[in-house]
Image (cartoon, grey):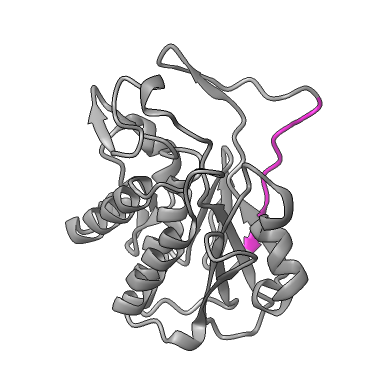
Amino acid sequence: MQFSDNNVLIVGGVLLVHPSPCAVTIARCPMLRLVFTLFFCAVPLAAQTMPPEADKQLAYDIYKEFVEIRSGFTTGSTTPVAEAAAARLRAAGFPDADIFVGGANPNKANLVVRYHGTGSRKPLLLLAHTDVVEAKREDWSMDPFQLIERDGFFYGRGTSDDKAQAAVWIASLIRYRREGFKPHRDIIVALTADEEGGGPYNGVDWLIKNHRELIDAELALKRRRLGRIRRGQEDLKRPAGQREIRHQFPL
């Protein structure tokens, strides 16, 4: 596997994006490592350096905040998730002009944020959805809208689908800004509503129809699950007809 400067690399369905060829995990638990491999270090690979504790804590805090917001398709709202992400970005210095919050319905807001590169290449769009499958308290042995760490796993509705990815995108942009990373492309993150339910409030569809200019990009990438957890063991069998293809794209 070859690394190059200013690259985007997909490994096992996980996107790695950084000018340095070093990608590290920030997860506290094995389950979260599957999706948090996306938090990057800006040092040579040989140094084997983890991100600063403050960065790991920030990503965890964003993750916890997102999971504990009730954003079920019919019983919750994605708007508080979008607003929470926007607040984190503004606190990190992102200008209001680069942050959009809106949607087809007051309870179905999406967030779009743009991190500016040099503009020598067309933008890269990173997607995650913030709605979750409904969760009834009586069906769970614990509160589904509380992030709980137990026996090396995180529990809670949306812990993997898809609030972990949403948290990774936001935490990464905040770190990029602080470190002064300047990619060739603008990096656009879109946290969208109603992937689970679809219909007239689907965030991707609404953005394409109403604000395409915000998300127009050469490349669009999102999390793709190729397996599932069964009795604590990961089943990585791919659906029939699918195969893994690895590419590198200059960032």
**Could you say where residue 108 lies in the image, as x and y percent from the top left?**
56, 59
Q: Is residue 65 above or below residue 30?
A: below
**Could you say where residue 121 lies in the image, as x and y percent from the top left?**
67, 78
Quadrant for residue 28, please give it.
top left
Q: Give the dominant element type of the magenta stretch: helix, strand or loop.
A: loop
**Residue 34 visible here:** yes
Q: Is residue 115 above or below residue 151?
A: below
Outermost residue on the left side: it is 53
**Residue 1 visible here:** no
Outermost residue on the right side: it is 241
Residues in magenta?
241-249
The residue depicted at 42 percent of the width and 46 percent of the height is 164
The residue depicted at 47 percent of the width and 62 percent of the height is 79
Quadrant for residue 180, please give it.
bottom left
Quadrant for residue 205, please give it.
bottom right
Quadrant of image for the C terminus: bottom right
The residue depicted at 37 percent of the width and 22 percent of the height is 138
Magenta-span inclusion, residue 248: yes
* Left or right for 117, reference 195: left
* Left or right for 85, reference 109: left
Quadrant of image for the N terminus: top right
Q: Is residue 181 above or below residue 192?
A: below
**Could you say where residue 165 lies in the image, as x and y percent from the top left?**
47, 49
**Could you say where residue 249 lies in the image, as x and y percent from the top left?**
65, 61
Magenta-span inclusion, residue 165: no
Residue nearest the observer in this picture, 151 or 135: 135
- Say how many tags the image has: 0
The residue depicted at 73 percent of the width and 56 percent of the height is 200
Residue nearest the observer in this picture, 168 or 140: 140
